[in-house]
Image (cartoon, grey):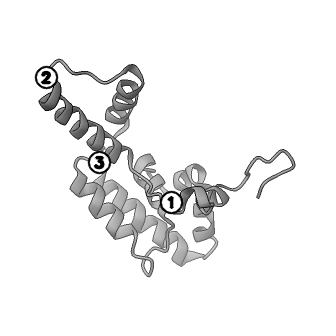
Amino acid sequence: MANKEGVIDDINDIYESKDFENARMLFISDVEHILNENLNRRKEQEGTNYEFGPVVDKAFSYAKRFSTFNSTNDAQAFREELSNTAQYGFQEHEITLLGNLCPDNLDEAVHLIPSIKQHVAEGVEGAEKIDRAISEVQKHCRQ
């Protein structure tokens, strides 16, 4: 909900707004892959001396440093597994945050991703869903 100053308090309000209607959330690993492919293509087109501008280079360095998946196949498998609404029931932003933050346990997941609390409120089944998701995180993410 937006408060008096127009600041949005609930992250779900942001993701459900028209601004994100057709947007797809990316893992940091996806960003690294996209920028790396772009850099390689530009080097082929413009010569091996081509470099990103300082802002894009900084983003590329960040993506390389904090990339969590070993390959695009791991990222895709992780997203597909956790997108199973019958088994997990996560929203797209929760899946992306789990993949980017790679929490080690239930408590860490809840602290890093507050919307995960709604799954914990489901009782034992909710906690088990999150534990299974964390197992998927650890199976696919870099350690």
Say the numbered circle drawn on residue 94: 1
Q: Are marks 3 and 1 in contact (CB under 8 Å)?
A: no
Q: Residue 124: percent from the left, percent from the top?
A: 55, 76
Q: Are marks 2 and 1 in contact (CB under 8 Å)?
A: no
Say the numbered circle drawn on residue 69: 3
Taking the image as drawn, is residue 68 in sight?
Answer: no
In the depicted view, which residue is nearer to us: 49 or 90?
Answer: 49
Q: Mark 1: few, some, or many residues within 10 Å (few <14, many ≥20)? A: some
Q: Looking at the image, which residue is at 63% across and 68% down?
A: 118
Give the Cα distance between marks 3 and 1: 16 Å
Badge 2 marks a residue whose secondary structure is loop
Counting residues from the start of the chain, the first of labels 2 and 3 encountered is: 2
Badge 1 marks a residue whose secondary structure is helix
Q: Looking at the image, which residue is at 49% across and 74% down?
A: 89
In the depicted view, which residue is nearer to us: 133 or 57?
Answer: 57
Q: Which residue is mark 2?
A: 47
Q: Looking at the image, which residue is at 41% across and 60% down?
A: 134
Task: Report whether 65 appears left or right of 41.
Answer: right
Amino acid type assigned to the residue bearing label 1 in the image: Glu
User: Quarter-wise, where is residue 135 in the image?
Assistant: bottom left
Amino acid type assigned to the residue bearing label 3 in the image: Phe
Counting residues from the start of the chain, the first of labels 2 and 1 encountered is: 2
Q: Residue 1: percent from the left, percent from the top?
A: 76, 58
Residue occupying the far bottom of the picture: 86
Taking the image as drawn, is residue 85 in sight?
Answer: yes
